[in-house]
Amino acid sequence: MMELFIKSVTNWPKLVIALVVLLTMGIASQMAKMQIETDTEAFIPPGHQATLDNTRMKEIFGTPDLLWIGVVREDGGIYQSDTLKVIQSISDKVRLLPGVVDQDVVSIATEDNIRGTADGMEVEPFMQEVPDDAAALLSLQQQIQGFDIFDGFIVAKNGAAAAILVELEPHTLLADRGLDKFKLYDAVQSIVDEVAQGRPEQFHVAGKPVLEATLGLYITEDLSVMMPLVFLVLSILLYFTYRSARGVFIPLAVVSFSVMGAMGIMAAVGVPMYPTTTMVPVTLMAIGVADAIHLLGKYYELVLLNPAIDRKSVVRDTMTEMWRPVVLTSITTAVGFLSFLTMEMVPLQMMGVFAAVGIIYAMFVSLTLVPALLVLMKVSAPKSLVEKVSQGHGLEGAGLVSRYLTLLGDWVGRHVTGTLFLTSALIFLSAWGASRVYVDDSYVSNFEQDSAIVEADRVVNKHFIGSYQFNVVLEAKDAEAFYSPELLQAVWSFQQEMEAKNTIVGGSISIVDYIRRMHQVMNENRPEMAKIPESSDLIAQYLLLYSFSGAPDDFAEVIDSEYRIANVRLFMTNGIYSKYHKIEADLHALAAQYFDPLGVQWSITGNGHISYVQTGMITNNLRFNIIATVLAIFLAAWIMMRSFVAGIFVMTPVLAAVILNFAFMGLTGTTIGWGSSMFTSIAICIGVDYAIHLIYKYRNEYNSLRDDKRALTRTLATTGKTILFNAVVVVAGFMVLIASVMPPNQEMGLLVSAAMFSSFVATLTVLPALILAAKPKFVFAGNKFETSKEQ
């Protein structure tokens, strides 16, 4: 059947080219529908408990992630009339932007004070108007410092900075209104930039919405820069490899079509571009050339052996010998990427799925477009190589690279035991370094540490109670349960102990803070009276008095309307995963200690918890995914080569390379985050191709020469050279990621490149040594793979 397919392609090449081009262009037209998704909640499966809890919390309390605008004034602090006017101006302008929740902006210019009066309690703005004399400014400062909720929240405790907190609608609602968070962030930044002109203050815009919006912009920037750069690097390498137009054009056509196919299908089925899936185009461009390189390598080999061969014959002979390894490597690589489906994080799953789609599409293009193009071209090979072969040097002497690889094959053939011993010792020593690798990550790690957005994050978290948030939702059985002094005291003790135990907890806010403030102002504002009243009736009376002058939704973010469900908001000054281990442990322990005895149900949520769960999935999934990838590729190789032992041999070089990489990470203190978590599976998926091509070629050479050492030198001189070119292209393609604006992509580029280099070396040394030492039947039995038996 394959023979008929090859004949059809070579008989009607123009028709094949037209059909492939039309199909690819049709699929690529769907790319215009592509959306970008950077919301961390989208990284977690919709049915995950953390997602369900977070959704319910937002439904009850409407607590969105906050955008922070930090206003810092070093010369005298923010309690100056001109600075307060700036804060008021920004607050007034930002609250009118479409997409701001109910025009809800929190700042010293918008918030209310609670104070006692002769008639009871009064709620009034801190700033009816901007104070313009020293006494009024001092009074404002004292009012803020006397209200614990706002001291450190909207104004730094030292008075050097003030915050403007903007509540944005969820991205789904923004989309329904034809808005997006990227444009909304730009609008906020434009307002700040306009007001900041010529001002002595420093302005910093931070918070999770800003990080997400900026990451979305970075994704677009990376795609627009990385793809042309990879294309350029591949073009240069292919030219110096083949010194011919076809040697450049054909591989680039394959990778271009594979990227368009994968991205078009991805957009057509409605999968957005996640930070992880930005790796798909680069990955496909780096590895998609493999099939074309191997086909061209065989094509040139046949031309060198028979320069007078006609076009159809050389193309048919090339495809007849190469279609099996092309199909096998493509399927095993695609199966390896599909093992990403074992991971819980949706973006990682999608990265694997559409990398697999692109690889299969590259296989399709390689088996159709490549032979169709070659059969239309004049038969040729580099003249210098033709001359060397015609002079009797053979394929081993055809070029400097072939000669050196022949020497390498000869050395390995004479030092089989030494090669295997050194490899075993190196892997044994590497295991210690690999054991030191651990998972750590944060959303801020997506950006350069000296970037403006990271600096804004540092400044905001230095001056205020923290831009990262954990929420503990408390649910009692009965309405008005949170009038109970006992329950309120439990909440207060919980807050105090969390702040005392963890330095990164900058502060916390709950309904208790407001009730304590009411009790204080109703008792002549004496500091010692900032405590929980002893009577439920008195608490109810305070809340009633507050309602006479306060807004009905003033407490909406901390208590429901029935006073049955409460929200304790804990603010963190750090978003690092390793710091959250203790936070999570303390939250669980203290919640159980204080609320379980009272029959109050509790759940932990908030963007801090979502981030913790998300990064924790990397830890939980990494080992399993590596095992799944190895098993998937092993089984694919076993089934397609019909040899259990062949599956083991195929996996050996790349596994040795991965262990070496983990050792390097452990010794250099490189941690695993969402980006680097993918390098292992990517390296395995790509590296296994080298072993498959070498095994196929070695087996054919041995069947022809019946000399194991000569078969090795011939294999390395021909297919070994192709593997070298392939490895150079892949390494160069991934090294381009160093130019990415996102550190995880930079790290990924380095790790995959290192793994590919190690895998290449292991394939040309360790694998041949294993073959010569073990003499496996799947190589030496003389049968084709499709009919061979297990050893």
Image (tube, rainbow, N blue to C red):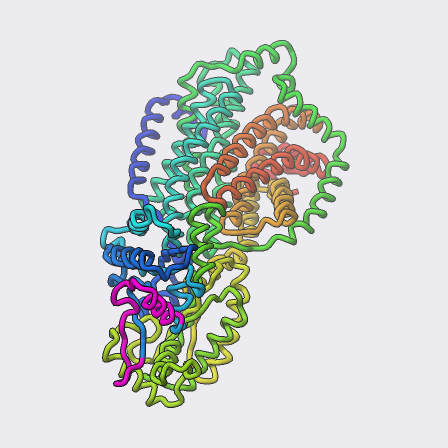
Q: Is residue 734 left or right of residue 115?
A: right
When asked about the image quadrant of residue 758, the answer is top right
Q: Is residue 434 visible?
A: yes
Residue 118 painted magenta: yes
Look at 65% across and 24% down and name the residue there: 714
Instruction: Indicate left or right for 704 with 312 as reference.
Output: right
Rendered position, 517 above or below 125: below
Q: Residue at x 41, y 84 (%)?
A: 529
Which residues fall within the magenta stretch? 116-145
- In the rendered image, residue 779, in percent from the top left (x then y), is placed at 64, 35
Q: Is residue 579 above or below residue 478?
A: above
How many numbered marks are there? 0
Image quadrant in which the C terminus is located: top right
Report x, y in % for residue 359: 45, 38
The residue closer to the viewer here, 91 or 394, is: 91
**Quarter the N terminus occupies:** top left
- Near-viewer residue (445 or 537): 537
Q: Is residue 208 visible?
A: no
667 part of magenta stretch:
no
Which residue is at 63% across, 9% downward?
Answer: 391
The x and y percentages for residue 608 are 45, 62
Which residue is more in the foreground, 163 or 86?
86
Asked if residue 156 is positioned above or below residue 113 in the image, the reply reads above
Q: Measured from the top left, where is residue 572 in percent x and y?
A: 46, 63
Location of residue 483 with respect to 729 vertically, above or below:
below
- The residue shown at (70%, 24%) is 407
